[in-house]
Amino acid sequence: MRSDSEPRTTTSGSRTGGGGRTGPLAAPIARHRVALGMKLLLYAVALTALFTFPDVAPSRYEVTVAITLLNYAVLATAWNFVGGFTGYISLGHGAFAGLGAYGTALLVVKAELPSFPALFAAAALVGLIAVPVGYAALRVRGASFVIVSIALVLVLLLVFQSWASFTGGSRGMVVPRPFPGMLRTEHHRVFYFLFAALLALALVTWWLIDRSRFGLGLKSIREDEDKAQALGTPTFAYKLVVFVVSAVFTALAGGLYALWFGDLDPVFQFSILSGAYMVLMALLGGVRHLYGPLLGALVVGYALEYSKLEYGDTPLHLVTAGLLLAVVVLFMPDGVIPAVRGLAARFLGGGQSSIREVTAAELLHGQRAAGSAAPPDSRTRKEVSS
Amino acid sequence: MSGLEITGLSKSFGGVCALDDVSVAFPHGKINALIGPNGSGKTTFFNCVTGMIRADSGRITYRGQDLTGRPPHRIARAGIGRSFQLCRVFPRMTVLDNLLCAVQPRTLRAKAGRSHSRAETERARHWLTRMGIDHLERAEAQNLSWGQQKLLELAGVLMSEPETILLDEPAGGVNPALIDRICALVSELNAEGRTFLVVEHNMDLVMSLSHHIVVFDRGWPIAEGPPSAIRSDEKVLGAYLGV
């Protein structure tokens, strides 16, 4: 068995090799502990805020804004299954939200299904529709894919506007409320938690894919699709699967919105804007991060709601969205989370600039976490110190 | 023993004929080289064989298996790995993840399993150590030097456990010391039983490394044989010197 002193040799060896800062050996671990503590604290605060908000909110209006933000967060996270993992930018994801909403509504109204079975049936149907749609759209990359995705929304908008006998057309469609006798305040409260649960489900699914081999395959598509194929990744099948998963979550969000809001209009349901919002939110937060789209949805969603409240019917909320997009593209191309992390690292960690130094710190941490060193570590040690 | 066999392969882009009814075979277990002037169809040939582009006609068989028209990932699974001209790695992934991307789980359960399993991580470290870049395990691939990226790409290809490896200009833009290292690696890996097909412009490298050489000119193989025969072949000299 290896003695405990070996990992230490590693660090000191590589640190002198890197010619970097020399500090106490425990520094990286302490830093890691601080980070972990901060993380747990953040989780606790966020969850407390989430659970108590409907009770402490000053009025019903704040709760409806919170529901809207949660809806945006689910949509942006659902979008990020495709956008974040594979790098395919879909501007047409509003189509799946609209289909989920209208599917739920039609199943309730025409097929007289109970509200929530209708919601899940509609999401399943959208999943089925997403197979041929993805099959066609995912054959093209880059700008072509973006255009195909836009075409999808526009086609559906025309269909749902023109087919008035079935969808209600431009007059809209009223969705019966799932809990008929319920007071309005209580109705909002229930949907607040339903949206929160759906968000949690989407986040957990994203996290599970992120750490899986499937997820790594998807990320390799984002980085270089040809290369991924050459390494044996069935890129098309991978893209299609994650596209369907994304469509189902988007449809669930759309359907839940229909049950909550109770009134659908094709212009808003099949709008390029809703898809563009999803992209903006995810990009603003950071598409490579689990909570990126959620954070983006909070920022962009709040900005949108605020400008709608203050400036009413003016298109100022669109200007706001445009400005936010400009800020992201100019100053934070990777989103808020990496930008903040970079700043934090600069202030807390100090000069982790060279590759070697990061490696040393991380190595030490890895070995400490693993307890006794494993054979590959000893191999690394030899190489580093030589 | 025959490995990769190509019969009647043709490919044209618009009016330009890149490959014209090419039939060649590359013996299994050898280091094969493919040379020819720029624009002679070498890379197109590579792309057709690995399924990156679809040939207009022709058949590709590998160890008795028909690979014609198969998508790239199926060809990779049949045991043919490749590197790219000018070197391609996954830039915004760590070096370790770059290698783990080459692990292809077959079952649904394995696909859903964690990407950083212990066994696979150790196998990846083995290749990184062999390439001499294991100390960069956690660095982002885009921060590596050109030569390190070349080694990383090779490590990634090896991680997918191919029997046959197609290298597109392994010595391109690489310093002489590293060229020697890559050559040594190719020889070692060949001694372990891997077949190579190398496209390369560096004639010294080709002549010293390969067992069998095929020369392309204008989408057509004009000569093939051992290095000694190629060196004195008049048609080859003509193609290269424009005589």
Image (spheres, grey):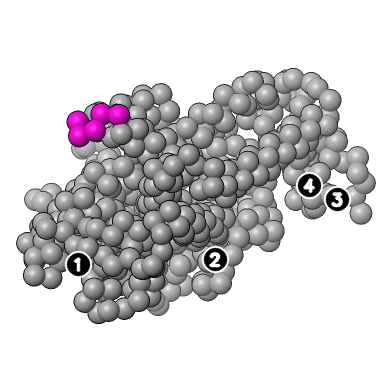
Give the CA separation, mark 3 to mark 2: 28 Å
Q: Residue A229 location, x and y as percent?
A: 40, 57
Rendered position, A86 above or below B86: below
Asked which secondary structure carries label 1, the reply is: strand
Give the CA separation, mark 1 to mark 4: 56 Å
Q: Read off the magenta span.
A: A310-314
Q: In which quarter of the view is residue A182 placed?
A: bottom left
Q: Residue B225 location, x and y as percent?
A: 38, 57
Asked which secondary structure carries label 2, the reply is: helix
Asked which secondary structure carries label 3, the reply is: loop
CB under 8 Å between callouts 2 and 1?
no
- The numbered disc on residue A369 is 4
Please name the residue that numbered disc 1 is placed on: B57
Please name the residue that numbered disc 2 is placed on: B112
CB under 8 Å between callouts 1 and 4?
no
Q: Amino acid at mark 4?
A: Ala
Rendered position, A57 above or below A336: below
